[in-house]
Amino acid sequence: MDIQTKAMGTVAIVEKQIIELPNGFYGFEQFKTFALIDAPQKPFIWVQSTDKRDLAFLALDPFLFREDYEIDIDDSLLAPLGVSSPSDVLVFALITVPSDGTPITANLQGPLIVNRVNNKGMQVILNDPKWKTKHDLVAEMAAKRGR
């Protein structure tokens, strides 16, 4: 199946790349279906709406730059995803690349959680004050290398 993307034009995807977010993303609740597409710049991925070409989020596995990242979510909150094992879960931090040259940031407070078994997902908001919506990605990577 081909979809129109914000960043890469027309892209061929397969069914297993499509995820369903019954509640959408915060601020974009009306959009429920997205495709996970590898970005040309590894290890980033695009979370591309299948319904709206101009709606896409750049994302990254947060554990690549924050080994201490913890997601403390009540099991009842994840129940709609049908998660039966922690190994079924994919976690993505949404990335912001500002056009004004300010730092590229990762949202660790509102990750995207996806059940890789059934491709259902949701954006959750973490209550831990350690996790913010704007973590400087370059600074976080530099700190990880410096350990």
Image: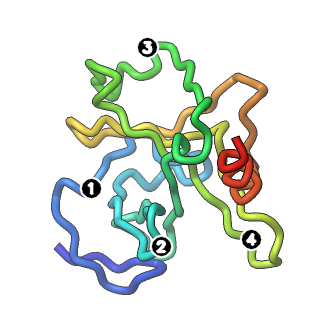
- Residue for point 26% across, 18% down: 84
Closer to the camera in the image, 142 or 90: 142
**Position above or below: 98 against 131:** below
Q: Position of residue 127 (x, y in %)?
A: 69, 23
Q: Residue at x 50, y 14 (%)?
A: 74
Name the residue tied to disc 2. Answer: 41
Q: Residue at x 67, y 37 (%)?
A: 109
Residue count near mark 2 (Cα–Cα under 10 Å), binned few <14, some 14–19, many ≥20 = few
Residue that carries the numbered disc 4 in the rendered image? 98
- Residue marked by disc 1: 18
Amino acid type assigned to the residue bearing label 1 in the image: Ile
The amino acid type of the residue labelled 4 equals Pro
Mark 4–mark 1 Cα distance, whole angstroms, equals 27 Å
Quick one: which residue is furthest to the front in this view? Answer: 147
Dot placed on the residue nearer the N-terminal end, 2 or 1: 1
Other residues around mark 1 within 10 Å, as few (<14) / some (14–19) / many (≥20): many
